[in-house]
Image (cartoon, coloured by chain):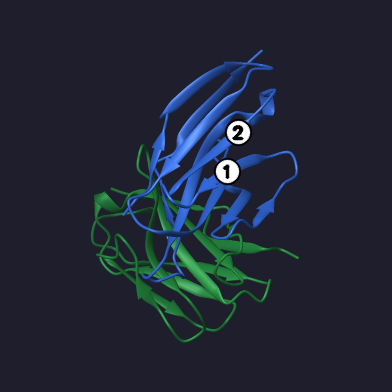
Amino acid sequence: QQPVQSPQAVILREGEDAVINCSSSKALYSVHWYRQKHGEAPVFLMILLKGGEQKGHEKISASFNEKKQQSSLYLTASQLSYSGTYFCGTETIGGSNYKLTFGKGTLLTVNP
Amino acid sequence: NAGVTQTPKFQVLKTGQSMTLQCAQDMNHNSMYWYRQDPGMGLRLIYYSASEGTTDKGEVPNGYNVSRLNKREFSLRLESAAPSQTSVYFCASRQRVGNEQFFGPGTRLTVL
């Protein structure tokens, strides 16, 4: 089952902040975040694991609420290069942990 | 180090034709994945291979078959292409559960 992302789209001016949310109805082992620019492949940003471990780029900030099965990606002091579609992917506990299920994405546009 | 490579980059088929999309990775990853991406739908998992010698269905497997030829290569076959299979196809790989996925550049397939 696909995780639900919100908002679907957001428009910012350079320097503004944004939060993208991801929620699941199932118990999660991990949440992944990827960014995709138009016509390109998704690129890894961060993984948040059950138990608190995080792996990813230093400039990216995210949280994982294990009780609520929710994750948020925080984009602060946005730059033009942040524009793109952001996807969360989830791995669930109890099912096949080898597959990552992605949400439908959040389109972020940063304007000068 | 090429990462994940896919061939072809573009393909146009007529309804009923067959073709195989090729994917290879040189990172010695255990798991490999095939996704399709349609506007507004995010990345949907077609098939995956948790390890060499195993394959499993994802969310949208109908009309597709896969082969994990060896640890490096994972191919996706369309036996009788339909217009509904017009999409961008991404192959991905990763070492293990909880690790990041690396995506190939994608194959843009049009079925007329």
Give the class, few, some or many, for how many residues have Cα within 10 Å of label 2's Cα (few <14, many ≥20): some
Q: Colour of chain A?
A: blue
A24 or A67: nearer the viewer: A67
- Name the residue located 40 percent from the left edge and 53 percent from the top edge: B36
Quadrant of residue B26 within the rendered picture: bottom right
Report if the CB atoms under discs 1 and 2 are less than 8 Å apart: yes
User: Is residue B66 visible in the rendered structure shown here?
Assistant: yes
In terms of sequence position, does the residue under pointer 1 or pointer 2 come before the other?
1
Chain with colour green in the figure: B
Q: Is residue B21 left or right of residue A49?
A: left
- Element on which disc 2 rests: strand
Foreground mark, 1 or 2, reads 1
Q: Which mark is residue A63?
A: 1
Quadrant of residue B94 within the rendered picture: bottom right
Q: Chain of mark 1?
A: A
- Identity, as a three-letter code, of the amino acid under mark 2: Tyr
B13 or B87: nearer the viewer: B87
Please tell me whether residue A30 is drawn above or below residue B68 in the rendered image.
above
The percent coordinates of residue A25 (x first, y second) are 32, 51
Please tell me whether residue A7 is drawn above or below residue B82 in the rendered image.
above
Q: Chain of mark 2?
A: A
The percent coordinates of residue B62 (x first, y second) are 24, 65
Q: Which residue is mark 2?
A: A74
- Identity, as a three-letter code, of the amino acid under mark 1: Ser
- Name the quarter where the N terminus of chain B is drawn: bottom right
The percent coordinates of residue B86 (x first, y second) are 33, 49
Q: Which mark is residue B102?
A: none
User: Is residue A40 visible in the rendered structure shown here?
Assistant: no
- Element on which disc 1 rests: strand
Give the class, few, some or many, for how many residues have Cα within 10 Å of label 1's Cα (few <14, many ≥20): some
The percent coordinates of residue B85 (x first, y second) are 30, 53
